[in-house]
Image (cartoon, rainbow, N blue to C red):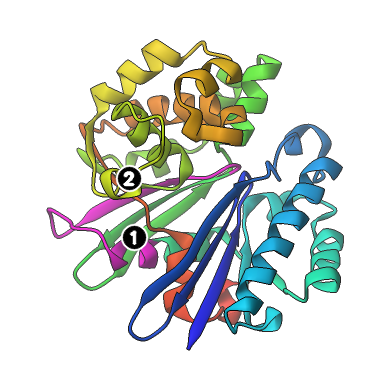
Amino acid sequence: MNRATIDIGSNTILLLLAQVEPFKEIAKLSEVTGLGRGLDQHGVLADESMEASLAAIRHYQEICVAHGVRAEDVIATATEAARVAKNAPEFFQRVQNETGIRVRVITGKAEAELTTKGVLFNTKFDNPEAVIMDIGGASTEFIRVLPATGRILSSVSLPVGSVRVSDWLRAGTFQGHLRHLFTREADALDSFRTPTLYCVAGTMTSLGNMHLGRKEFVEDDVHGLRMRAEDVDQIFGRCGGWSPEQFEAEFPFLGKRTQAILGGLTLAHHLLHRLAVDEVVISTYGLRYGTFLEGGLRDEYLA
């Protein structure tokens, strides 16, 4: 039996289509649509981003059906942008009408739990306790977990991500937003201080590939990659003032992610310092894998 999950993030929409038993990947795709772009300024999903997102989901639906997964059986989740945008319900109703895929908006806590399940699926841990960071487009999750049992000790979802920070940088308001966030969430951030941070999702996997100096993304080399916090500082020092065009010229694998990578890099740089991180370990597994392993969405996961 095959199963498919779609992770509709605030910057990227990802598909995982795989055989359930034994687990075997069939298709794993990623499309940057910037669904959360301009969200803080306008409070709604932008027309251009919705059209790009719908096209990506329609393409994924065709792939799923071709491999025996009905549209109504695809497990599709949406995260922070969908939790905030006023027009998200209307957009996802349109997605269902045109593709047959029902999109479910999940809570920040559910996002953290499912991401953790995905990371634990194929990541090696050094210690009995681990802290995971997931920088998304509009939110960042921190999870403290016992890897041996999968027990989550604590988690928090912060309303900051690569797309939001990119918007703040363009508007010249980033420093003010960062000070406000670090003050408001001081206790939460203190509770996730750690020398080793396990990192998942597009920003950190991209930084890992940039650290390797690759023009193309090589997942097998990025998954499990260890980087010093100083390595991220060096990338930030070198690229912190770059335009999207400069990122594209130097790192063509970024593609459309060039529009938000500066925001993600800037956020990662500041968060690693705030958490007193010495080393990061990159995982290319995350929410879509956790959802796949879960096999469905429990009621308590829904926003």
- Mark 1 element type: helix
- What x and y, as percent, mark residue 62? 69, 70
Chain-order first, disc 2 or disc 1: 1
Q: Which mark is residue 119?
A: 1
Q: Which mark is residue 144?
A: none
122 is higher (above) or lower (below) than 136: below
Q: Nearer the viewer, mark 2 or mark 1?
A: 1
Q: Quadrant of the C terminus?
A: bottom right
Instruction: Please report the bounds of the magenta region as a residue range.
Output: 116-138
Q: Is residue 55 visible?
A: yes
Give the quadrant of residue 248: top right
In depth, the one of 36 and 205 nearer the eye is 205
257 is higher (above) or lower (below) than 10: above
In the picture, measured across the screen, residue 256 lies left or right of residue 18, that is right
- Mark 2 element type: loop
Mark 2 highlights which residue?
191
- What x and y, as percent, mark residue 183? 49, 30
- What x and y, as percent, mark residue 269? 39, 25
Give the quadrant of residue 119: bottom left
In depth, the one of 6 and 62 nearer the eye is 62
Give the quadrant of residue 244: top right
Q: Is residue 303 visible?
A: no
Is residue 131 found inside the magenta-colored segment of the image?
yes
Is residue 177 found inside the magenta-colored segment of the image?
no
Q: Amino acid at mark 2?
A: Ser
